[in-house]
Image (cartoon, rainbow, N blue to C red):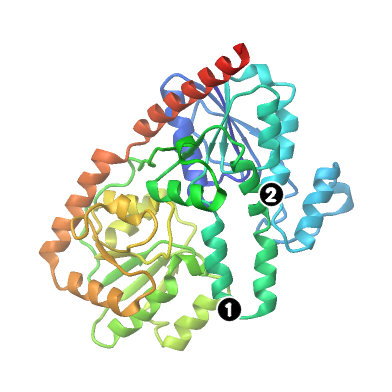
């Protein structure tokens, strides 16, 4: 099959959507399919055999000058104007504007592809692509409605709450588009329930295909660092539960010698840095970011325990990657995390999200039981090897493509 894979931002380090795009495209090509990725900035890292077509935006959120105002010479058309006006009025334009741009790019190339695969853009332009006669399937990793609820609840001022409501305004469009899509893929049963509930999509139009774990994630060959805890999450996002973990570390630090390594880049002077200082644990917490895959795998394997304290996850790929490294886990009983780790206590200990006391107790108990940590780590790796393969993801996704193409052909014949 000839696949057009569409993603409005795709760099792996920007989140799970970029990881999904890279590994899925590679495995589809390995199966003999032709894959062309259409992406806005930041552009993806792709493997040999996958073609990249750049669909540039104005890149308004790039580092080191996010929320920049472009020079007049940078404007190319009315879509660019809409992008800037939406940003100026505190909205997030990328899903809508990318969908319009990629629909325009594909208009003269419809016959070159058998199917278009939307990687959580869910913009109006996707409906235009389908109307042109190109079969369409969409992956929704999870509806961002949950992020909106958590962020607004955590906002401390009316002004901030109103600003967040405006920022998440694109969700109205995504809900409207999702209800009109013929076929949706998602990564967990939890996400399927939430897509049906929050976007009003009929469950029988949603198929679950779990994510895979890359083979670079392997157990360590050197001893783990005594007392080292690890977490991989956006430190300043309330949904990731890092504040809960920091409170637990503060409690544990009064009676134990431990350190917490956070794989992220916190906002300077942001809520995370302030909380660390308020709790008096600046000497116990360090941040790591911008490292290579090999360095990341080594870091994952260096921790005695990893924590995933999120309030919600559509899948939690870092959880599965840590399991592949045989790193023992304490995780939240939230979203799809229980689906990833399996039965409580086998590959991870599950705790109530947002409860620092329970989290601290679970960490302490696991630190005191080295034999159980080893057993848990080995069980986690076994589970990943049995259930989470990118090749299996590609095979199942290609089968879904074939069904959509067949349905589309049948409808045309009628």
Residue 140 is at least partly visible in this image: yes
Kindly identify the residue that appears in the image at 74 percent across and 25 percent down: 107
The secondary element bearing badge 1 is classed as loop
- As rendered, which of 385 and 204 lies closer to the eye? 204
The secondary element bearing badge 2 is classed as helix
User: How far is the residue under mark 1 from the one under mark 2?
Assistant: 27 Å
Kindly identify the residue that appears in the image at 65 percent across and 73 percent down: 161
To which residue does mark 1 refer?
269
- As rendered, which of 343 and 279 lies closer to the eye? 343
Tell me whether circle 1 and circle 2 mark residues in contact (CB < 8 Å). Answer: no
The image quarter containing residue 247 is: bottom left
Sooner in the amino-acid sequence: mark 1 or mark 2: 2
Kindly identify the residue that appears in the image at 38 percent across and 27 percent down: 395
- How crowded pointer 1 is (Cα within 10 Å; few <14, some 14-19, many 20+) is rated as few
Image coordinates for residue 198, horizontal then vertical, percent: 53, 53
> Which mark is on residue 94?
2
- How crowded pointer 2 is (Cα within 10 Å; few <14, some 14-19, many 20+) is rated as many
Image coordinates for residue 378, horizontal then vertical, percent: 17, 51
């Amino acid at each position: 099959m000839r696949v057009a894979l569409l993603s409005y931002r795709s760099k792996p380090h920007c989140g799970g959507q970029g990881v999904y795009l890279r590994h899925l495209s590679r495995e589809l090509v390995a199966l003999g399919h032709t894959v062309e990725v259409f992406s806005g900035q930041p552009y993806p890292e792709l493997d040999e055999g996958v073609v990249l077509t750049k669909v540039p935006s104005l890149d308004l959120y790039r580092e080191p000058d996010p929320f920049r105002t472009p020079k007049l010479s940078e404007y190319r058309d009315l879509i660019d104007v809409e992008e800037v006006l939406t940003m100026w009025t505190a909205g997030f334009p990328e899903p809508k504007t990318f969908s319009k741009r990629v629909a325009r790019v594909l208009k003269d190339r419809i016959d070159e592809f058998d199917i278009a695969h939307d990687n959580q853009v869910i913009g109006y332009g996707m409906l235009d692509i389908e109307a042109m006669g190109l079969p369409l399937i969409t992956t929704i990793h999870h509806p961002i409605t949950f992020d909106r609820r958590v962020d607004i609840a955590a906002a401390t001022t009316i002004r901030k709450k109103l600003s967040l409501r405006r920022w998440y305004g694109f969700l109205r469009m995504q809900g409207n588009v999702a209800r009109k899509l013929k076929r949706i893929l998602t990564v967990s049963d939890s996400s399927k329930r939430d897509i049906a509930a929050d976007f009003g999509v009929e469950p029988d139009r949603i198929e679950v295909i779990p994510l895979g774990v890359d083979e670079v994630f392997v157990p360590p060959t050197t001893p783990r660092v005594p007392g080292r805890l690890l977490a991989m999450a956006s430190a300043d996002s309330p949904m990731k539960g890092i504040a809960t973990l920091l409170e637990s570390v503060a409690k544990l630090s009064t009676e134990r010698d431990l350190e917490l390594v956070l794989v992220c880049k916190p906002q300077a002077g942001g809520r995370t840095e302030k909380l660390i200082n308020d709790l008096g644990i600046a000497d116990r917490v360090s941040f790591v970011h911008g490292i290579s895959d090999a360095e990341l795998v080594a870091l994952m394997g260096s921790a005695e325990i990893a924590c995933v304290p999120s309030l919600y996850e559509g899948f939690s790929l870092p959880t599965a990657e840590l399991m592949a490294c045989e790193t023992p886990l304490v995780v939240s009983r939230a979203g799809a995390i229980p689906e990833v780790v399996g039965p409580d206590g086998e590959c991870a200990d599950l705790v109530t999200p947002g409860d620092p006391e329970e989290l601290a107790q679970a960490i302490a108990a696991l630190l005191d039981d080295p034999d159980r940590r080893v057993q848990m780590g080995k069980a986690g790796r076994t589970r990943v090897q049995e259930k989470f393969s990118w090749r299996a993801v590609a095979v199942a996704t290609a089968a879904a493509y074939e069904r959509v193409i067949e349905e589309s052909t049948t409808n045309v014949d009628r």
